[in-house]
Amino acid sequence: MTEQRRVVARVLSDSKDHPDVETVYQRASEIDDRISIATVYRTIRLFEEASIIERLDFGTGRARYEEIPEKHHDHLVDMRSGKIIEFECKDIETYQKAVAKKHGYELVGHRLELYCLPMDDAK
Amino acid sequence: MTEQRRVVARVLSDSKDHPDVETVYQRASEIDDRISIATVYRTIRLFEEASIIERLDFGTGRARYEEIPEKHHDHLVDMRSGKIIEFECKDIETYQKAVAKKHGYELVGHRLELYCLPMDDAK
DNA sequence: GTAGTTGCAAAGCTTTTGCCCCCTT
DNA sequence: AAGGGGGCAAAAGCTTTGCAACTAC
């Protein structure tokens, strides 16, 4: 466990948003500027493989990350502001399992994003 | 409307799977080998912007495409074989709208993928 | 001391673009 | 004839990697 990994771990843990690698790198650099972006990539990959963080991708071409939460949730993307809202919906998950089963599969994971506009903008 | 675009359009239309750009390029080349991959990219982008096709992305690093269907559907990914199964579930969509509304949003689009293993493999 | 980690820069992959030529209309 | 479209190769954007130096234990 090196200093660099500690810093990256701390940044990821402290981030309440869903930062991309560049953002993690910037935040880590503020704490300790001897860190390189290659190390950030390597460390993030390591954490991802260890199931400590999860990769998200909202179609922007850059991967974003969050710590794997206690409680699973999905994401609602505010298309106007880019804000990400987390939500949980047990009913949806129940139906997902049912769909998988109907096709002869066991549900192992899923990915759900809702792309939305604020009520007032919608029209 | 040039020959190249006609060929790409035909390939996309004939493809029952969800080909990536490289695959579309290969299939197009079999029909007419004077096509370049740059043109395939350009044409696919054009069709995407014209809402003729839709971009999919199953986390493999390459975008995949399908014609926009009459009836909306989502995708179940067989993690063992890579096969993609299309499904439709009205109930899930109803709950999605409800979730959006609860947060003060209007649902504009969504993305749902189920990652599954065949029943027999699961354990 | 040794195995594992970092920095740097180069390379990899997918996708986009500049430029000039060509085809379509 | 004019203008959009295509081919090629170079460039861009994100991510990974080779290698030598360095660190943690």
Image (spheres, coloured by chain):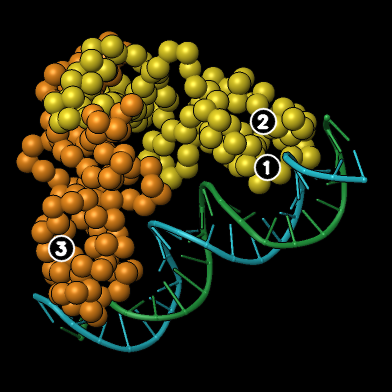
Chain colours: A orange, B yellow, C green, D cyan
Task: Answer above or below: position of A89 versus A57.
Answer: above
In the figure, B84 relative to C15: above or below?
A: above
Give percent across and percent down for residue B118.
30, 21
Left or right, A83 with reference to B88: left
Amino acid type at image mark 2: Val
Q: Give the chain letter at badge 1.
A: B
Residue projecting furthest to the left: A70
Quadrant in which the N terminus of chain A appears: bottom left
Residue D5, percent from left and from top: 73, 39
Categorize mark 3 by other alpha carbons within 10 Å: few (<14), some (14-19), many (20+).
many
Could you tell me which secondary element the residue under label 1 belongs to?
A: helix
**Residue drawn at (42%, 25%) of the image:** B83
- Circles 3 and 1 in contact, beta carbons < 8 Å: no
**Which numbered disc covers residue B8?**
2
Q: Is residue B123 left or right of residue B5?
A: left
Q: Check the residue under mark 2 and report the chain it is in.
A: B
CA gap between label 3 and label 2 equals 46 Å
Numbered marks: total = 3
- Residue bearing mark 3: A11
Where is residue A91? Give x, y as percent. Answer: 14, 19
* Residue A94 image offset from top left, x and y in percent: 16, 18
Residues under labels 2 and 1: Cα distance?
Answer: 9 Å
Q: Secondary structure at mark 3?
A: helix
Q: Mark 1 highlights which residue?
A: B39
- Foreground pick, A83 / B24: A83
